[in-house]
Amino acid sequence: MSWRKEDIPLLQEIDAPYRSGNVEQMRQLLLNNPHVLRMKEGTDFWLGMAAAEGKLDFVKMLVGLGIGVDESDQPGVVGQPLERAADAGHFDVVDWLIKHGAVINTTFQGKTCSFALSGAARRGHFDVVKILVEHGADVHASWMGINALMQATDYGHPEIAAYLRSKGAKDIRETVPPDYHASHARLIQEMVGACGPMSDWKQVIPGNPDVTIHLIPANKKCRDHVIFTIGLSDHRLPHETDPFGATELKLLLPKKWSVSPESLTHHAENWPIEWLKRAVDVFRKASAMPTPPLLLLNESNPKEPLSESSKQCGFLCHRAPEGARQMPDYRWIGYRLLFSIYPEEVDLIQTKGLDEFIKRLGEADIGFRIDLKRKNVGMK
């Protein structure tokens, strides 16, 4: 959305009283120049901005000039002023807009949405959440698989979450059965889309749940071999504010690493996979997502090298940089990445913290792949 180029000087003149709080001066300028009451496409600009900034006197003035309480800066979108005011926690603006007929619930792509309620819940504006619900906000409304209750929970507002539950709201994942098969298919689809085609090689790790290790050999799309699990996410690992937390595991091997089916039967090449299996066992036995930093070391001798060709002694299991993605059953699943580390780096993590270790990796431009010859950032 945009303005006419020739109107820019006039818009700057109108913006001055808006910024200084002179409602009457701005009103007169808009009365004298009605063609800039809206942008050139006929969409709102002023009301949405005033609502977002909590300027109730300007909201009243602009509606008095003829801007509808539900007008938006995008064609076909309604309720934007209320949404922006609610997101910013401007109770008086929200209250006034509701009393003057603002739409609280909308329908988008066939589903009921309440962006104002979700925004207020996410930002922790309890008073705004309450007034919206009291005036008909649908506590079951959702967008992209997330409703207001989930927003309040995810962003650490337990009092709002409790209130919404008292009004009948439920986490969508409570009402939708887990669909492990569809989630596995989605994870594989996204991994292949990001990294390239899978090899026919795979290994099944029997257990509860069964976990399958897959391989994407290095290719034009990805310079490293990608080894990843499918199935571990069937085991719930609640963490922080997500009671439905889950994860898969992966590791990256350099292109020169032999990953033929035959070579992966020999210890010299398959020891990273054996450690991946250990990690699977750790996560399958856990009742909650392990608290970082998660270090995987030899129990008998934590400083024992991983292999004859390496001085590295264990793995850091760290959240993969691409983050989590939502599955067809609305659960969020991400990957934890296994990264081999030196004894001195173990000491660094344990004494100065994970953030310091990650910072040093960044300074040395070291990626999260297994590299037996890389710089040891635990030594300075």
Image (spheres, rainbow, N blue to C red):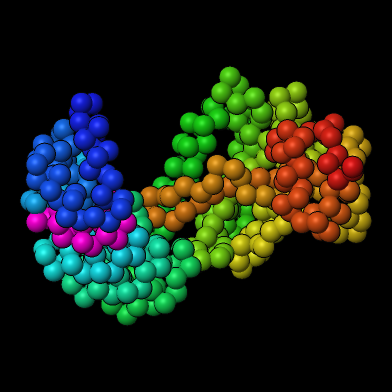
The residue at 51%/49% (across/down) is 324
Please state, as top left, top right, bottom left or bottom right, where the N terminus lies in the image: top left
As rendered, which of 153 and 117 lies closer to the eye?
A: 117
The residue at 11%/39% (across/down) is 33
Residue at the top extreme? 220
The residue at 81%/44% (across/down) is 341
As rendered, which of 207 and 347 lies closer to the eye?
A: 347
Q: Is residue 35 above or below residue 68?
A: above
Quadrant of residue 365 within the rendered picture: top right
In magenta segment, residue 61: yes
The residue at 53%/27% (across/down) is 197
In magenta segment, residue 246: no
Quadrant of residue 294 within the rendered picture: bottom right
Left of 227 or right of it: where is 186?
left
Q: Is residue 259 above or below residue 327?
A: above
Residue at the bottom extreme? 166
Please state, as top left, top right, bottom left or bottom right, where the C terminus lies in the image: top right
| Rendered location of residue 106, percent (x, y) | 18, 56
| Rendered location of residue 287, percent (x, y) | 61, 68
Bounds of the magenta segment: 49-64
Left of 171 or right of it: where is 101?
left
| Rendered location of residue 369, percent (x, y) | 71, 36
Magenta segment main secondary structure: helix
As rendered, which of 324 and 199 lies closer to the eye?
A: 324
Q: How many marks?
A: 0
Regarding residue 249, the answer to whether it shows in the image is no
Regarding residue 355, the answer to whether it shows in the image is yes
| Rendered location of residue 147, percent (x, y) | 33, 61
As rendered, which of 12 and 271 lies closer to the eye?
A: 12
